[in-house]
Each structure stands twice: as structure tokens, then as C-alpha cells.
Image (spheres, rainbow, N blue to C red):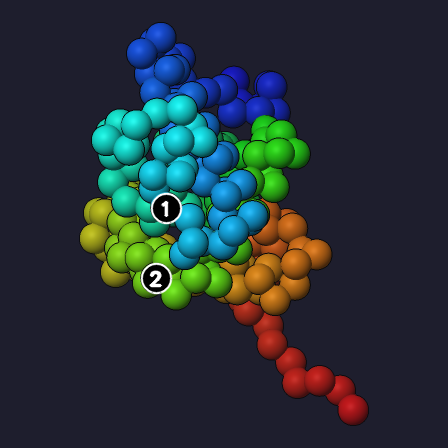
Amino acid sequence: MAAEQSGKPEPAKLGLREKKKQKTRMTLQHQAMRLFREQGYHATTIEQIAEASEISPSTFFRYFATKEALVLEDEYDPILVKVFREQLVGLNPIQAMRATIREIFSSLREEERAALHDRMTLSISVPELRAASLIQMNESLQLIADLVAERLNRPRDDFEVFTFAGSVFGVVMAGQLYCLNHPEADFFTTIDRMLGHLEGGLPLMGQLE
């Protein structure tokens, strides 16, 4: 298995056109996050982001439909799908998901981790971004359900598969909020710990006096 041998997910090969498009998207997100930090999300306009990225406002919309999309969209879903599918058959769904998260985390450069943390923090601290992220909930939950159903050879609308997918998605949401309240916490490590807690049956004891 290639991912196991290298310890790092291999990105799909892109043509020159797609590489240029991906580079422009990354530039737009980088400049947007810089401006959001410097002058605030609401004070930053699409025109300012486009100018900082050296493109026209009309060209901006070829890459992102809205300003919110700059924060909420990324390139990680295809990577997650690929790495999850490559996990050992003997792993149960939670173990496979934890292994996937660890593998993706280990592949990220420090600046990529920092950018992901900044976007995640912004997405749950700005009300309209938080609302927009909830719209993506169904798609994200269905993605997890599809991967698990495929792995277990069960229907994608299976009741237990959906219950599991909802639990994992709840962990991700809880991890985001936890990291917002604990800025020192690493998002990937937090998610892994929470999935471990889920795998262990969610033991929850009262605090001893």
C-alpha cells in the first residue's frame, strides 16, 4: 500500500492548467486570511482580496463563489477519501478514520497546519461563517457515510452507518469548538483523542470529590 510505505498520502497528478488553478486558489486564500487578520473579516472586501492576489474581482468568482467560501472550502476532501480507502481492511471504521487523520496530519507542512487552524477558528467565530458551515453539514456527513458504507459493503443510507457518520461528524464539530476555547490545542490531535474516546464507548464519570 503506497500510503503505508511512504507514511504520506500521495496527491493526484495534476495537469498544468489544474496546477495553475490550484495555485491561484491558494494565493486567494492566503491573501484573504492575511487581510482578515490585519483588518477583520467584515472590513475586508472581495475587491481588496482580488487586488492583493493580482487578479480582477470578476476573475475571483471563477475560483470562489463567495467570500465565505474562501474560509470554508479546501482541497482536503479528496485526500481524506483516498487515504481512508487505503487503510488496512482489518481496521474498524473508527480505527481507519483515526489512521487517516494521523496520516494526513503528518503530511502537512507547518504553514499548512497554521492556515487550517486559522480558517477553522474563523469559521466558528464569525456568525455568518458559522451559519454557512452548517449548510455544508449534510454533504460532509454523507461523505463519511459513503466511505464507511463502502468499507463495510453496506448501503449508503444504512441506519447504523448514518448513526456512525453522525457521531464522527459530531466529534469534528466538538473538536472545533474545543480548540476555539483552547487555542493551545492542536486540532488534529484533539480530533484523534476524541475519536479514541468514542471508540472506547464514551466513558464519562463524575468528578471525584
Figure check: 1 above or below 109: above
| Residue that label 2 marks | 128
Inspect the image, locate mark 2, and give the three-letter code of the amino acid beneath it: Glu
Q: Mark 2: few, some, or many residues within 10 Å (few <14, many ≥20)?
A: few
Figure check: 16 above or below 18: above
Q: Quadrant of the C terminus?
A: bottom right
Inspect the image, locate mark 1, and give the three-letter code of the amino acid beneath it: Thr
Q: Position of residue 127 (x, y in %)?
A: 39, 65
| Residue that label 1 marks | 45
Q: How far, Cα to Cα, is label 2 from label 1? A: 15 Å
Farthest residue, direction bottom: 209
Viewer-proximal residue, 57 or 147? 57
Q: Is residue 134 left or right of residue 6?
A: left
- At x 28%, y 33%, the residue is 57
Viewer-proximal residue, 21 or 54? 54
Figure check: 165 above or below 112: below
